[in-house]
Image (cartoon, grey):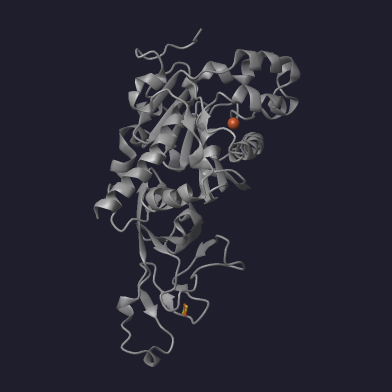
Amino acid sequence: MARYPKPAAGSWTEHYPQLGTGPVSYEDSISPEWYQQEREAIFKRAWLQVGRVEQIPRTGRYFTKDISAANTSIIVVRDGDDVRAFHNVCRHRGNKLVWQDFPNEDTSGTVRQFTCKYHGWRYGLDGSCVFAQQEGEFFNLDKADYGLVPVHCDVFAGFIFVNFSEQPAQSLREFLGPMLLGVEDYPFGQMTDRYAFRVECRSNWKVFSDAFMEFYHAPVVHVGQHLSPLRAAITQMGYEAPHYQVEGAHGLVTTAGSLHRVWDMPKENVKPADLATRSGLFGPWDKSDLGELPPGINPGKVDPWGLSSFQFFPNFAILIWEAGWYNTHQFWPTSHNTLLFEGNVYSLPAKSASERVGREMAAVSFKEYSLQDANTLEATQLGLESGVIDQFPLNDQEVLVRNFHKATADWVHEYEHELAKA
Ligand code: FES
Ligand SMILES: [Fe+2]
């Protein structure tokens, strides 16, 4: 029997009738042709999160980011109050403008101007071409015509988003919509302790994202994190979330606090390392006091509240935890069956050595869990690619997975429709 009430329609899935309840095809996760369509329809048209404003605190601070799915690299730079983004391509003869040591690796730093490593053309922070070497050798060259190619860029709650459309169909705020805008007043800007990691994985970007949209797998994939007296009980108990929400292509799942209060468990059931550091996957046990949180963090009014996982279509998620910290996941496809996963863990700056140890423990636990997922998802990709089965049943806890695959298909089909009209 369900531990939490379902919506009046009988289930979360039926509460969103556009989703249907039938089996779902995963052809979208094994087809190279479909991935090419996703690149055009989604990664070159949706707003994509690329970093935080704290990464570029002063004028001239920049970072670059390769976005394989959009077939480009970008430069994101602070220019006074403005955050700007440009394609990372020199206007003279197409050299990748900003890189260090290895052309295909991202970099960051501080500059007054960007100087091309090939023939020394220079660009201001606003992208304008300010110097062409031996300018007189060119033919009627007007530098004003040769600024860096801008990329639409906007900031929400300190998160920097870019959009590769010539003219985005929606502003960033319209694209995000009310549910995601609800996180706006969370004190992200104060949480400057950051642990980051990235890993390359051999699975489709959606197959990987799926595992971060449902907790149905948690009592199985992650049970090894627990000491043996608990394992059988956890697997048998299963998991259920008290609240799901779908808003267009975006999603939200909220968990209840009582289910993951590791610190309330009998001590013999808690890992010695967690006990010693008073920390673990669910973050440091000693809660950071952030004051009252905005109501949009827990729109389902789940009490006791544990965490809210906001899924930003297409490839970004913010998880806000009751203990006063947050983390992000991002899934960057590099081909139809490979991706780059980026995880970040953020909290208030540690005020003592023990707090620091707690934060590091939380970060390594998070990484350990993510790698458990990554391992399984490579196996899932192999199974899907065998092509033996195409129709897969999804349960009510997989409602966000169902919505996500539908949303990617909708974006591809709408784009094709637009092209056909043009
Ligand atoms: S390609 Fe950049 S200066 Fe020539
Ligand atoms: Fe997982």
- Residue positioned 41% across, 13% down in the render: 6
Question: Closest to the observer: 266 or 90?
Answer: 90
Q: Residue furthest left?
A: 421
* 77 vs 365: above or below: below
Q: Residue furthest top?
A: 1
Q: Judge whether residue 360 can be spotted in this image.
A: no
Image position, residue 277 (x, y; %): 69, 30
**Name of the residue lying farthest toward the front:** 388
Left or right: residue 9 versus residue 120 is left
Q: Is residue 111 above or below residue 353?
A: below
Tell how many labels: 0
Q: Nearer the viewer, residue 293 or 7?
A: 7
- Residue lying at the far bottom in this picture: please name it: 137
Q: Position of residue 422 (x, y in %)?
A: 24, 55
- Residue 414 is situated, as x and y percent measured from the top left of the image, at 31, 44
Q: Is residue 128 left or right of residue 268?
A: left
The residue nearer to you, when weighing 272 against 252, is 252
114 in relation to 49, above or below: below
Question: Which quadrant of the figure has residue 84?
Answer: bottom left
Quadrant in which ligand 2 is drawn: top right
Q: Residue at x 35, y 20 (%)?
A: 15
Q: Residue at x 61, y 37 (%)?
A: 377
Identify whether 159 is placed above or below 207. below
